[in-house]
Image (cartoon, grey):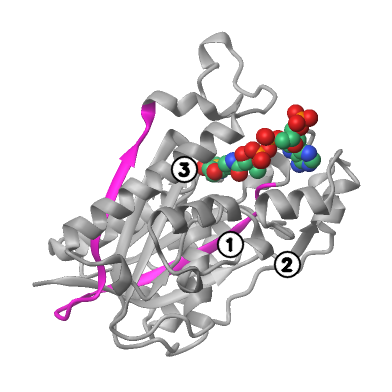
Amino acid sequence: MRYADISGWGKCLPPAILSNNDLSSLLDTNDEWITSRTGMKERRISHVPVSSLATVAAARALACAGKQALDVELIIFGSTTFDEMCPNASSNVQKQLGATNAACMDVNTACTSGMYALSVATAMIKSGVVNNAIVIGAEVISTVMDWNNRNVAVLFGDGAGAFYLQAEEQESGVIAESLGCYGESREILAVNGWGLKNASNGLLHSDIHWAFEGQEIFKKAVSGMDQACQKVLAKSGVDAADISLVVPHQANLRIIDTLTKRLKLDRDKVFINIQRYGNMSAATAPVALVEAIEEGRVSPGKLVLMPAFGGGLTWSAHLLRWGERTHSLGESEMQLPPCDKTALELITPD
Ligand code: ACO
């Protein structure tokens, strides 16, 4: 049996920090409301395009696995905020890394993009199409944010996480997953004015307007991730008590708490970093897993459950068996260019 072991991991967080207090200088909101309703304290704002964040995260994952760019056979880039639609974004990562032997594919399922990308790469390795892959979840949601809308502006941030996967004989990597979508409710989370929907009217660039029914999304997020987790546990024959760590999508601390209670999971086993980054959409779950490994929360041979949810409304859950290694084999020298603006300056037009 062939598996797709996660043998490298890396993240890239842009340096500019946007705090709750910064947001309250722009909008009718405050730290108390944001913290108590979401668990978020600050988030990052990128000064570079998403492909730059993605490339640095990918270079770090590659170095962590002790591999060279020319070894890479496939790059799958999950995001909603690609720099351009044609050529695709993964080809830009290939170029910047010098990974000239890699096939390149983009995936967009909103916040679950990094996790759907993980499924595609795992399946392609398991079936023998490729022997390894870089999987990226990266987002610069700040570029499409409606900064006048307090309902959404406080919730999101930018970042990137990446993994290097390689074929392995021993059981490791994704051992079961469940993917789905509440397409009938897709309009309750929509970024209107972004995309080619208005092209027939000659309106290629209109104002961005978020449709965001927070409470409905909240309910769907809980039910979507709940059913995905139940399916994964049933499929794998694993008992919830045997999960050693849960690394969920970080959209709202109250969503995570509700899900944890529904699944009767031990709260101490749930990894949380929402206070630092908010919801980074496609980057959220990958960055959370990278930080869980860095903080020593992931142990060799143990089971990790990763539920996620996003626009679409897409949902997923992945059950991972961690491999033998939790330390990094090397570090990349690749860095982002310096940022000479504050987060508030980055989001405020000149
Ligand atoms: N600051 C202060 N007050 C606010 C803010 C804010 N930033 N935002 C809303 N309010 C107000 C509302 O106007 C409302 O006031 P009113 O009672 O006078 O009308 C009040 O706070 C309560 O608003 P609710 O919408 O009821 O607040 P709720 O407790 O539901 O929290 C939230 C809102 C945080 C958005 C929550 O519903 C949520 O997290 N939803 C899910 C988000 C999610 O899952 N996203 C993931 C997918 S995103 C993706 O894929 C791209």
Image quarter of residue 152 = top right
From the top left corner, tell me how far across and down residue 322 is, in percent.
31, 78
- Answer with mark 3 or mark 2, whichever residue precedes in sequence: 2
Q: Which residues are magenta?
A: 155-183
How far, Cα to Cα, is label 1 from label 2? Answer: 11 Å
Q: Which comes sooner in the sequence, label 1 or label 2?
A: 2
The percent coordinates of residue 154 (x first, y second) are: 73, 46
**Label 2 belongs to which residue?**
15
Tell me whether circle 3 and circle 2 mark residues in contact (CB < 8 Å). Answer: no
| 225 vs 148: above or below | below
Callout 1, which amino acid? Leu
**Residue closer to the observer: 188 or 209:** 188
* Foreground disc of the pair 3, 2: 3
Q: CA distance from mark 3 to mark 1?
A: 27 Å
Q: Secondary structure at mark 2?
A: loop
Secondary structure beneath label 1: helix
| Mark 1 or mark 2, whichever is nearer to me | 2
Q: From the viewer's perspective, is residue 327 above or below residue 248?
A: below
SS state under label 3: helix
Regarding ligand 1, which quadrant of the image does it lie in? top right
Residue at the spot 53% in from the left edge and 40% down from the top edge: 218
For disc 3, the marked residue is 221
- Disc 3 marks which amino acid? Ala
Q: Tell me which amino acid carries mark 2.
A: Pro
Of badges 3 and 1, the one in the foreground is 3
Q: Provide the residue designation for mark 1.
A: 53
Kindly tell me whether mark 3's CB lies below 8 Å from ligand 1: yes
Which quadrant would the N terminus be assigned to in this image?
A: bottom left
